[in-house]
Structures are given as structure tokens and as C-alpha cells.
Image: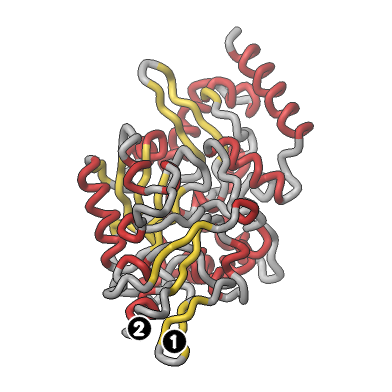
Amino acid sequence: MDNLPGGFPSSDTGVEFRILKRMFTPEDAEFALYLTLIPEKSSVVARRAKVSPREASRRCETMAQKGLIYRIDSDGDPPMYMAAQYAIGIWEFHVNDLDEGLARDMEEYMPLLFKEAWKMPQLRTIPVNKSLSSELKVMTYENAEAMVRHVDKAVVAPCICRRERSLLGKGCDKPQETCLIFDTGAEYYQRNGLGREIGQQEVLDILKKAEETGLVLQPTNAREIINICCCCGDCCGVLRNLKAYPKPASLTASSFFAVVKTETCEGCRVCEDRCQMEAVQHVGGKASVDMDRCIGCGLCASTCPTDAMALARKPESEQPDVPRDIIKASIELGRSRGKLNLGDLLMMQVKSKVDRLLASK
């Protein structure tokens, strides 16, 4: 699992094995090794695992339903299966069967996972729409409302981070049903009973509610999104770990930062309360932004009563290069961790083609 893009580093305490044992049976763990990052029919996996096609189909489907591997459905074609990384992936797929033991293990493991595996952000931060001014040039892939108008299917699921913290008695009062999943991801979530299908208007309503309640919008770190997380600094595993660093802005994929018009700032501190990164302080009765901590979410600007807070675009040299799609993003993430080099990818593709050819005979 550590060879997959998102990583699964080893710890000194063995917490990662406790997590695996809670999720995988020994048989599941062994069978998972026969799947790759390339979606394949169960008949191809059967040949690799040296089991009958019927047995492979049963085991692939069972493991997909348990949230241990990923399933892709196409109209009129057999389902395809592929390996799933731990986070973002298997962990989130267990939102509906999370218990206190797993929550405690993840709480212990997350700082190490973040430190060792977050070499490139899996999520990026985009502004809430209410913070976008007419003077600010914003690309479509930086505008939540514009992006969701292009998706074919949407599902909303509970936020696993707020659910985990609630189990540990450390939850918050933010909305829980805020995790937005799109298209192929939505199909998987709906098939596994992880969320409910919603229409475009409800997606927009959830985004509006996220802004009102002070949630940071974090979509897939790709121009073609498959999810948008609506995150709070009290529960979100990513934001909580970012906050622990002195310069979280340097670890975030964001093209924006907040600026203050001191001449109109009245020192009401609304922006300070809304900031999830503790980036806003008040000095001499005026708001001040710590640029090393600001991640450009826009929550401060969207509710400023005097419009003293606004967003600005970073210099081009400081703006992130957002990958085209999740495939490109996953490859770049793996390479940032020293995995998935060109030789690895070529070998994976050749092996898959050979196995597909032989499985068809």
C-alpha cells in the first residue's frame, strides 16, 4: 500500500497494522496484491491470482463493497476493479462503519501519514464563491459553482473527519453531510451506500451552507474534480495537521491570499473568528494577515461587513500547477514520493495488457 500514490508509511508503534487488521482479512490482504492502479475486469485479476473467474468476480465485488478496492462501472460493460490507496480512498470509504477503535488509531496515525505522504497536496484550496470579486480573475477550475455545473452525477456523504472527531468526543457543530462526490466517484459511493444522490441545486445549496458556516472548500487537486471536501479547522485531518506547521501556506495548493484594506477595517474580528488557519490577528485595532498561514479560502472576505478583507491572486511563479485530471494528479503524487517512475508505469501497463490478452482466450 505504501507503493500507491497516497502512501502508507510504517510507524514505530505498528498503528498502521492495527488499522489494516480492522479492515482487511488475511485473505482480502493477499487478494488485494493482485490489483493495480489500472482498472481491470475481474477475469484479468483471476488469471493473476490463479483462481477461477467466478471466484475472482465474487471476491472483487465483495472487497469493493467493503471499501477495500475501487470499482468503476460503464454502461453495458462488466465492472472494472483497481487498487485503492488508503487516504484519500479506503479511509473515507469507511465513513459508515467507523468505530471508536478505528477513530483512535487514525488519530494516532494521521500526523505521520501527513508528514511522510503529503509530499504533494491531494486537495487544493479554492475560494468560497461569495469572496470572489468582479476584479479578481478566476479560472473555471478555481470556481466551485462553475465546476459543479459540469458534473453529470453528484452524491453527498457524511464528512468522515467530523464523524471521527465526534466519536472521540471532540466534534464540532458544523454540518456533517457535506462531502461532495462526483461522476465515477459518485457511482461508487451510491453503490456502496456511502451517500445519497443529489441534484445540482442541492450541491449549490451545500456550497452556500459551507460558506455560511465557515467551511473551507477543498476539491480534488486536479482541474477535473471528483470531489469537494467542505472542511473545518477543528476536525479536518488535513487542516488540523496543516495548522501544526509554522507556514501552512507553503504546503497548500492555492492561487490566492487575503489582503486587508486598513482604512476601512473597523476591527470587528469577524474575519479572525472565521479563519481556519489562525492566519488573521488584530494589531492596533486592525486586522492583519499572516501570509505564511493564509491558504486563500476567502472565508474572511465573504462576511467582512465593511469589505475591508479581499482576495488577491498570487504572483504567477507562486501559483500551483494544477494537474489535468485525477490520473495525472495520482502519477505526480506518486512520483513526489519516489514511486511510479516511468519504468514502474511501463511495467504495470505491459503486465496488464499481457494479462488482459491471456484472460480473453
The residue that label 1 is drawn on is 282
**Left or right: 265 as drawn, with respect to 40:** left
| Label located before the other in sequence (1 or 2) | 2
Q: Residue furthest right?
A: 343
Kind of residue at disc 2:
Arg
Crowd around label 2: few <14 · some 14–19 · many ≥20 (10 Å):
some
Please tell me which residue lies in front, 330 or 208. 208
Q: CA distance from mark 1 to mark 2?
A: 7 Å
Q: Is residue 71 visible?
A: yes
Q: Image quadrant of residue 114? A: bottom right
Residue lying furthest top in this view? Answer: 361
Q: Amino acid at mark 1?
A: His
Which residue is the site of mark 2?
269
Q: Residue at x 31, y 35 (%)?
A: 153
Contact, CB < 8 Å: mark 1 with mark 2? yes
Residue 174 image offset from top left, x and y in percent: 30, 69
SS assignment at label 1:
strand
**Residue at position x 41%, y 57% from top?**
127
Instruction: For mark 2, give the secondary structure.
Output: loop
Which residue does the image show at 32% across and 65% down from the upper left?
Answer: 302
Q: Residues within 10 Å of mark 1 (few under 14, many from 20)?
A: some
Q: Residue at x 52, y 23 (%)?
A: 41
Q: Quadrant of the C terminus?
A: top right
Q: Is residue 118 above or below residue 247?
A: above
Q: How many marks?
A: 2
